[in-house]
Amino acid sequence: MKNMSLFLALLVLAANPSICKGQHENTCNVVLKDQYIEWGSDTDIVYLSSCVPPKIFWTLNNRRVEESQWRSVNSTHAVLSLRNFTHQSAILEWHSADTHQVLGGTTITAYSKPGKISCILYHKNQSDELSVNLFKCSWEDPNKPSAQILYTVLLSTSSNTSPREVCRSNSKYCIWTKSSRISPLDTVTITVRAKAAAWEAGSDPRAFFPDHIRKMIRPKLTVTPFPDHVSVQWLRASFSKECHCEVSYRKAVDGGRLIELRPNTVPERSHGKVHIEEWDSCSNYTFSVRCALHEAPWSDWSEKKTVLTKLKKKDVKPLLWRKVSEPTEGGVRKVHAMWKEFPSTCRDTFTSIKKAPNKEGADHEEASCATSTCDVYVNRDAHRIILTLLQNKTLLVEDSVYVPAIGESLPRVTDIRTSTREGVILVSWKASTEPATGYMIDWTHGGNQYYWEESGCTNATLSGLLDKQPYNITVTPLFADRTGHGARALQICSGEGDPGNVAIQVQAKAKSALVSWTVRRRGACGGAVVNYTVRYGAQRGPRLSVTVDGKERLISLKDLRPETQYSVHVEAAALTGTTKSRETLFYTKRFDPEHVTAVSVSVSVAALLVLALGSCVAVLWKKFKRKPVPNPALSSVVFWPAASHQEGTCPLQPFSNPSEIPCDRVDAGEALSPPSTSSPAARCDSDAGGERTEEYVDPPALPAPGDPVKSTETRRPSPPDDSTGPLLPENSPYRRQNSVERSSKQCKRVLVKPTVTVYVTLDMFEQGQDC
C-alpha cells in the first residue's frame, strides 16, 4: 500500500462553537484512496474528523451526490463511493446540511491507459523493396497530449518474451527502425506505457503477426487502350506471398470531377493484369492500383496513368438522317445529311458521305466531311445517301438513308398532335396506311440546328429543349428500303413566357385621366394576357386599382382631384406570370379643356355677332344719313308743279318726303315712254265714267348737245321769275332725256306754273324708294 501521506488533504475550517464547545479550532481531514484515479474506474473517499456535524451532504462539480453513495463508518469516519469516474478533473466538496456551509473538499484528477494499439511494418522508400524497414505503432489516449506525459513502447517476441524498450514519445505514435532480431515468423507483442509525475499506467499488450502488419511497396502500373477494352497491368515486388490488388479509374469532367470508381480485386503472386470494358469512347481516364497481403494494410496508390480511350465499335450509332430542300427550277435539290456527332477527341476517325442514284450498279460520288453534317446535291430522281465511318483505315460502321424522287407517291403520317408539359414537348400521330418499321422525328429551333431521334411507336417525347422557344417538328415514316414523306406539325413553343413589356400613355384632365397602353410581346412564345390591372393613387392617398379584360387597351380614371400629382402603372397578367409597366407621374389640370374650349367658342361667337350687328347698324346709319345719288345712266327728267300752284283735291306733297306722296309709282317703262299729247292745262274734273285722269304738260324738247340753252314754254307758260326748272350743264346726260309722264287712276291733278323738275333714277326703285 502506498504512503497515505501522498493522498492526505488538510482542510482548515472554522470551528462551530455550538458543536465543539471548549475548542479554539477544529481540524477535519479528507483522505482519498487515490488522488489520481484511472479513467472509468471506481474509488472510495474517506472523511476523518474529530468534529463531525450531525448532517452533511456531498457535491461533485457543484452537483449534489445522492445520499446512497456515502455512509458513516463511525463517529469519526465517513466514506463516499464514486463509480465509473469519467471526469478529466472534478472538485469534490462536503457541506453542512443545516447551514449549507462548505466544510471541506478536494480535487480529483483522472488518468487513462493507452488503448487501441495498431502497428505497421513498411519500407522507408516506397519504390524500393530493399530500403530500410520501419516499425510504426499508434494508440489512443483520452488524456490531452502534453510534455508531462511520456509514452514508452515495449516490444517482445515469441522467441524473446522479455519486454524491451524500443521507442519513446510525447505523442500518440512512435516510429523506429525494425530490429534484425525480429524474425518474420515471430509473433510481436507491443505494450505502451504512459507515465506522468503523479501517476503511471500501462496498456494491455497487443500481439501482431509480421505478415499481417507488413505494408507492401506500391506497384508499377502500365495502361494500354484498345478499341474494345483497356488493359491495365502492374508489377509488384518479388515478394512470393499471395496478395490482392485494387484498380481504380476515373473519368475527368469539368476539371477533374470524379464520376466513376471501379475497384477490382485480383489475387496474384507477383504481378497483376485486368481488362476494363466499362468506359466511354474517346475520353481521358486516369488509372491507379494498390495491393496488400492477406489481412495487411493497403500499399500506397501507384503513380497515376492517364490515357485517351479508343472509339468502341458498339458505341458507333451514327443514326443517319437527311433534310431535303425544295427543288430549283431545274429540279436540283440540296440534301442536308446529318448524323450523331462523335467526340472531337476521337483521333484517327474519319467520315465520308456518298450519294448514288437508287439503282443497281449506279456510280457513287464521294465527299469527305469532317463534322457531323454534310450537304450534297441531287437531281429529281430518287437517291441514297451513304455514310462510312473509318478508324485507322478500318471500317467501323456504314449507314444509308433514302431520298425520294420528286413526285414519288409515298405514305405519310396524319393527325400530328403536340402539347407542352414541364419543359418537354409531347408528339403523337396516326400511323401511315402502309405498315412502317419506325418513325423518324426531327425538330429544330430557327432551322440552324437540327435534332432527331427514331421511335418505334406513334408518339415521342422531346426533351433537352431551349426554354420558351418555338419549335418546328416533322414526322417521317420509315420502311425497309425507303422512307415516306414527312409531315410537319404546327409550330409549338417549349413553354410560354411572361407577358410582353407594357408601355403606357396618360392624358390628364381636371377630374379624370385617360390611360392607354401597348404591349410588346416577348418573342413568339410570350404568354397571352388574361387581364390588365391599372393601379394608381395620389402621393398622399390610398392606392386604387381597376382590372379590365385582356382585350382592352385603355381606361378612364374618374373622380380625381384637380391640380394633384398622381402615379399610375399597368400590370399585365398571364397564366405564366405578370409584368408591369414603369411608374408614370402626371398632374391633373385646374379646368377641363372642353369647358375652356366651349367658353372660348361662345365668346368668339358673341364677338362675331356684336361685330356683325355693329356693321349692319353702321351701314344702315350711313345710308340713313346720306341721300342716294342718282345714277345718270338710269335717270329721266320729270316736271312737277310747285307746291304753291297745286290745285285739286289731291295736293302734291313735297319731294323731300317721297314716302308720303299719295301717287302711284313710276314704272321704268313709263319713264322711258314718249311724251303724251295731253292738253297744256289740266284740272281735277270728273269724267262721265267717274274716272279721274291726270294730265301733264309736255315738257319742252331738250336741245341737242352743243346747242345753246333756250327757255321752253308750255301752253301755259309760267313767268320766268317763278320757274323752278334746273339749269343743266351742256354736258349733262339729263339734257338728252325726255320728261316722264305720270298718271294716276285715283285723282286728277292740274299742274300749273311754276313747275319743278325732279330727277328720278331706276336705282331708287330698286332700293325701294317711293316717288
Image (cartoon, helix red, strand yellow):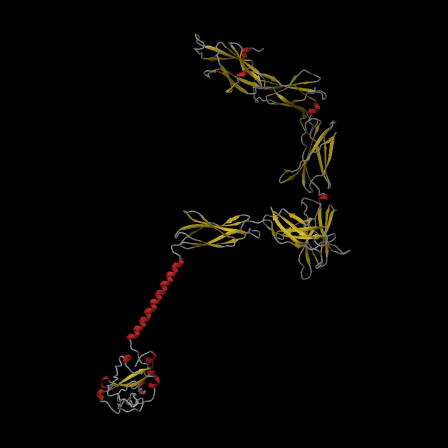
Left or right, residue 30 beside residue 410: left
> Does 119 sit above or below residue 225?
above
Which quadrant of the view contains residue 434?
bottom right
Whether residue 732 is visible: no
Query: Residue 255, how many percent across, how many down?
Result: 62, 39
Give 221 or 466, whichever is nearer the viewer: 466
Q: Residue furthest top?
A: 22
> Does 63 sit above or below residue 750?
above
Where does the C terminus fall, quadrant-wise? bottom left
Left or right, residue 137 beside residue 273: left
Give 65 or 291, whichever is nearer the viewer: 65
Which quadrant of the view contains residue 234?
top right
Whether residue 24 is visible: yes
> Does 658 sit above or below residue 606?
below
Left or right, residue 43 beside residue 97: right
Query: Residue 192, how many percent across, how many down?
Result: 63, 19
Q: Residue at x 68, y 58 (%)?
A: 333
